[in-house]
Amino acid sequence: MEDEILALEAASKAIEPNAGERAKLRSAVFEYSEEFLHDIHDKKAYESQDAFDKLLKKNISEEGSALSVILDIIRSDVDTPGLNPASGGHLGYIPGGGIYSSSLADFLADISNRYAGVFYAGPGAVRIENILLEWMADMVGYPKNSGGNLASGGSIANLIAIHTAREAKQIRSQDILKSVIYLSAQVHHSINKSILITGLGDCPVRQIDTDDRFRISTSHLQKLISQDLADGLKPWLVIASAGTTDTGSVDPIEEIAGIAKAHDMWFHLDAAYGAFFALCVNPPESLSGMHLCDSIIMDPHKGLFLPYGLGAVLIKDKQLLYDAHHLTANYLQDALKPRLEESSPADLSPELTKHFRGLRLWLPLLLHGVKPFRAALQEKLLLARYFHREISKIDGFKVGPEPDLSVVTYRYIPKEGDPNEFNKQLLKEVLADGKVFISSTMLDGKFTLRVAILAFRTHLNTLKYALRILSEKAMELETRFSNV
Ligand SMILES: *Cc1c(COP(=O)(O)O)cnc(C)c1O
């Protein structure tokens, strides 16, 4: 038996490279990462290529391959086709970027593989998570007894918040048909998913009207609530956005909080996109009421420019988060008794084992300080105002409202023909050029183009280029449209 065991040990050696082998692997990977970054400012933001020749040809097989071959596949079939989120030209959806120091923190977290789920196992790793949550709570203006969790992104953060709200308000199965949820059509679809996943899909959901800037109309909200109360229903949850994905609009947080409080409802604020603008040198006033909600989410992989994989949820009363998630098991009996003041992520979220994702935020914040983040966020706000001003000066473009944060909507109105069709074509042309990536949405039934400015590599020259390409392509299309 011993011989057999030793033979297996020898056969598995490849997964434990020695120092010399590690150095070779490392230098190949770092060389590749430098190759990727050295011309990142010239790389396309979008490459419309759907060929995955090498990727599809390469089978997962018994024998390993050279790292150079694998990096070659990554270069051609992974890091080339589609959207390039690391590019400053990424102006679609809600960008972020992926700062370098965060990638190094991920490397360190993976090397040590500290257990970040339970304080007993990884006290330092858990402390880091708690320090970050306290820092974010402080930014929002939450009290000391608030709590939270570092999740993989905003969607899961929303899920944790909605589940906590349900438990806190004790919505049992028999209450669901009478328990009303209020939200606007501008809410992120991960909210609707969360409602479904938490078993609240049969709650009546009221769609609150929005004003001409796509913000929740509080008078309509009030009206809906009064109607539901008169009908014997129970309003229990209102959800607003601090930065909608479509237009970057910030709902009137303070007024909504007042209404929620008056009716003893839970107020959840989806600030996945907008929260970190509170760090700006001159933070937008619209964000000043964030401390009034019962729960809030924010995405460091958007607003703090981290690589994908980090969203945060905060619950104003930590006890409620704990009550909604704490369960234990025999095999965890050695872990210390949970203490609220040094809580373990496993007691506050659906996850047990989790990636040590705190390090990817903590290390950059310590290394750079908060200052450059404040400046970058302020820069993005100004860039959005700049783009809004400049695009409205170009003949034919009709621009949406002055941006609350860093999303600008606009569309071209052609002299002849269907504007929707024209703007679809215009989008196609801009993507075919590929230097900048923009996306579209439907607003009041109109096909609308948008830029979302949040990639940390997006600067003034990026926006100047975007303005130029939009104007050039619109003119070309206008000629083509009028020639048919
Ligand atoms: C991005 C976003 C989400 C979802 O977050 P993910 O990190 O993509 O899961 C939720 N709400 C808003 C407002 C967002 O912008």
Image: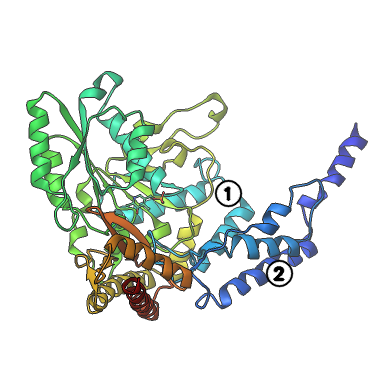
Q: Residues within 10 Å of mark 2 (few under 14, many from 20)?
A: few
Q: Which residue lies furthest to the top in this view?
A: 174
Q: Which amino acid does label 2 sit on?
A: Ser
Which residue is painted at 20% across and 32% down in the image?
A: 236
* Amino acid on which the number 1 mark rests in the picture: Arg
Q: Callout 1: helix, strand or loop?
A: loop
Using the image, determine if residue 69 lies above or below residue 175: below
The answer to which quarter of the image holds residue 78 is bottom right
Residue 27: mark: 2
Badge 1 local density, few (<14 within 10 Å), some, or many (20+)? some
Tell me where residue 303 appears, x and y as whole percent: 37, 61
Mark seen at residue 173: none
Regarding mark 2 in the picture, which secondary structure is present there?
A: helix
Closer-to-camera residue (221/301) = 221
Residue 243 shows in this picture: no
- Seen in the image, is 210 located left or right of residue 85? left
Which label is found at residue 114? 1
Specify whether residue 409 is in view: yes
Image location of residue 383, percent across then percent down: 30, 74
**Nearest to viewer (mark 2 / mark 1):** 2
Could you tell me which quadrant the C terminus lies in? bottom left
Nearest the viewer among 36 and 281 is 36
Q: Quadrant of residue 273?
A: bottom left
Task: Tell me: is circle 1 under 8 Å from ligand 1.
Answer: no
Which of 463 and 268 lies nearest the eye of the viewer?
A: 463
Q: Is residue 6 left or right of residue 304?
A: right
Q: Residue at x 56, y 45 (%)?
A: 115
Residue 285 left/right relative to 440: left
The picture places residue 361, in percent across and down from the top left corner, at 46, 59
